[in-house]
Amino acid sequence: MTLVAPSTPEYLTIAEMTRDVYPGRAYNRNGLDLKGTVLGLTRAKWSVEFRVEVAHGISNTNAPCYRVEEVTFNVGIRNMRVYLGSELQGLSCLSDFVWEHEQEHVRLNKELNAKASAHAKAEVQRVLKTLVLNQRSRAEAQKYATDVIRKTLVDATSAVRDEGTKG
């Protein structure tokens, strides 16, 4: 999945971003977090899209059997947004500093995106080596294979995404 980094920021108030990042904290009368505020925020929306094709065949015992013929998928970040505090508009030095900081989050998200795709591919290949489809109908085999591949892709993507949020 090709990831295009935002070239211009969107704006939210500092209070909105702080409440979003730190829900449940105490805020002063201006709506700002008493322990610190969020001046910029990078949000990435992850996506898992895939298709599984199951083919029908005949086993060496003349029993019907099924196999996964093809798996196509895209995993990763579908869209990324960078927000700056609306209060920073007109404060070029501070705004530039926060924008540069958020670009580091954009860079890290791009790295995670590439890593998620590679990890998902490896996991799908691993699962396909041992996937047995012994269902009675093609529809059942298709559903089973789709469920297995969905879980594999979601787990693989989540593992990389969770790794990226540590620290």
Image (cartoon, rainbow, N blue to C red):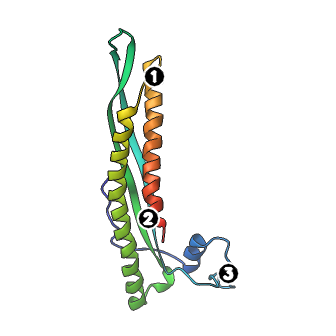
Q: Which mark is residue 164?
A: 2
The image position of residue 99, as x and y in percent, is 39, 80
Q: Image point 44% across, 34% down: which residue?
A: 146
Q: Amino acid at mark 1?
A: Ala
Q: Earlier in the sequence, mark 2 or mark 1?
A: 1
Report the residue marked by disc 1. Answer: 139
Give yes or no for contact between labels 1 and 3 (Cβ–Cβ under 8 Å): no
Asked which secondary structure carries label 1, the reply is helix
Q: CA distance from mark 3 to mark 2?
A: 28 Å
Please name the residue shown 54% across and 80% down the image.
14
Q: What residue is rendered at 42% in x and 47% in y?
A: 48
What residue appears at the point 53 percent right and 79 percent down from the top-left corner? 38
In the rendered image, residue 53, in percent from the top left (x then y), is placed at: 35, 29
Report whether 139 appears left or right of 23: left
Q: Say whether disc 1 or disc 3 marks the residue closer to the N-terminus.
A: 3
Q: Are marks 3 and 2 in contact (CB under 8 Å)?
A: no
Q: CA distance from mark 1 to mark 3?
A: 54 Å
SS for tag 3? loop
Q: Residue 124's spot in the image, x, y percent?
A: 37, 41
Say above or below: 96 vs 78: below
Proximity of marks 2 and 1: CB atoms separated by less than 8 Å: no
Name the residue carrying label 3.
Answer: 27
Left or right of residue 40, residue 73 in this image: left
Dot 3 alpha-carbon crowd within 10 angstroms: few under 14, some 14 to 19, many 20 or more: some
Q: Secondary structure at mark 2?
A: helix
